[in-house]
Image (spheres, rainbow, N blue to C red):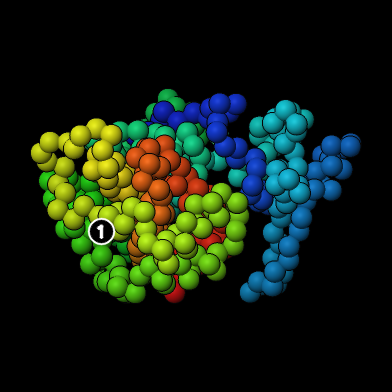
Amino acid sequence: MRMEYPEYYERFECIAGACTDSCCARWEIDVDDESYYTYQTVQGPFGDRIRGCLHEEVKEGEDGPEYEWSFPLTPDRRCPFLNDADLCDMYTALGHDKLPRTCREFPRGDAVVGKYHQIDVALACPEANRLIFEDLEHPIKYINRAEPTGVPALDRYCAVEEPALSGEETGRLYDLLEERNQLMEVLQDWSFPLKDRYGVLFALATEYGVDASAENHEALVELIDRMELLDERWTRVYDPVKRAMDEGFPCDFVLQGLAEWTGAGTRPEEGSLDAAMVDSEKELVRFLVYLVFRYYIDGYFENSLTGVYRLLLRGFHMMRLLLAALPQEAFLDAETRRDLYHVWSREVEHSPENFRLIKSE
Ligand code: SF4
């Protein structure tokens, strides 16, 4: 098994009580099949409580009915097992191994194809978000290795293996990963002006059938209006965009970007809007690289990179809109800017409905 992951993955640790968010509130918990069947065997009042919280949805699949289970939120938008002390009753009663897969893994995410296993952590977690934006001065390094690392959170992936790929499938996978790596390298190469690096992204998007010019602000706002609302914080960050479409963007310079910026030369005066703009553009690049690494593999499963490029372009332009709609004092604050990515990730990456929408025509 070959694993690949960003270098910050090894440093990730849940900060639990010190976390400014909670992964146990504001979104429904999907229950995987294995956990569902385990919960059917739990005895006593706690077993009854679990089964009482389970929600079942039946969809018509190609081969008959398909079942999906979840734990819907309570009226105050918390997980039904999160108690008043913000501790998980299921964890206390049954232990970590019996939590649904979503809870066991979050914010870790993985994709496995044959002997290739890709692993990372999601921007929706504030601690992962901090690590992703921690070092703006260097490109994100990705580690590719076949041997165990000694880090238990990684080594458990060594054992997972899918059926071997055919020669044709292996070739397709490695071509895709090669293209992904080149794109990540170009995006993070500060010796080229930003406009050239984004130009490579847009050219590839066109090659894969995405019309970059159609992804304008009006089309994006129309798309966002169709999204399911998962978290009221999304309203807080998105409402200013709607207002700004009529009244003008407080940080309208963000919409243009730093076209000629290469990273060379002296840094603008600390605390100035120019310095914030430079950092903001570096954050945007890291966000793109995060998306490229995480989702390029979808092109293998979907047999097309069109949906992936829609996601990349729309994610990129949505973030520009959210950033440009910030009041200028808020834009100066790195934590406020980075929190936009956290809120975006919760709303888009962690809603299957919104994620499908952003990748679709
Ligand atoms: S969001 Fe991240 S840091 Fe916060 S509790 Fe969840 S896993 Fe831990």
Front one among 81 and 134:
134
Q: Quadrant of the C terminus?
A: bottom left
Q: Nearer the viewer, residue 117 or 81?
A: 81
Instruction: Quarter of the image for the N terminus: give it.
Output: top left
Question: Whole-percent x and y of residue 264?
Answer: 11, 41
- Name which quarter of the figure residue 8 lies in: top left
The image quadrant that residue 331 belongs to is: top left
Give me the residue at 76% from left, 47% from top.
74
Give the residue at x 76% y 49%.
75
Q: Residue furthest right?
A: 44
Marks counted in the figure total 1
The residue positioned 56% from the left and 59% from the top of the image is 352
Q: Position of residue 32 (x, y in %)?
A: 66, 50
Residue depicted at x 37% and y 58%: 249
SS under mark 1: helix
Q: Is residue 318 left or right of residue 191?
A: right
Give 193 or 170, whichever is nearer the viewer: 193
Mark 1 — residue? 256
User: Is disc 1 surrounded by few (<14), some (14 to 19) or many (20+) residues within 10 Å?
Assistant: few
Q: Residue furthest left?
A: 265
Q: Quadrant of residue 151?
A: top left
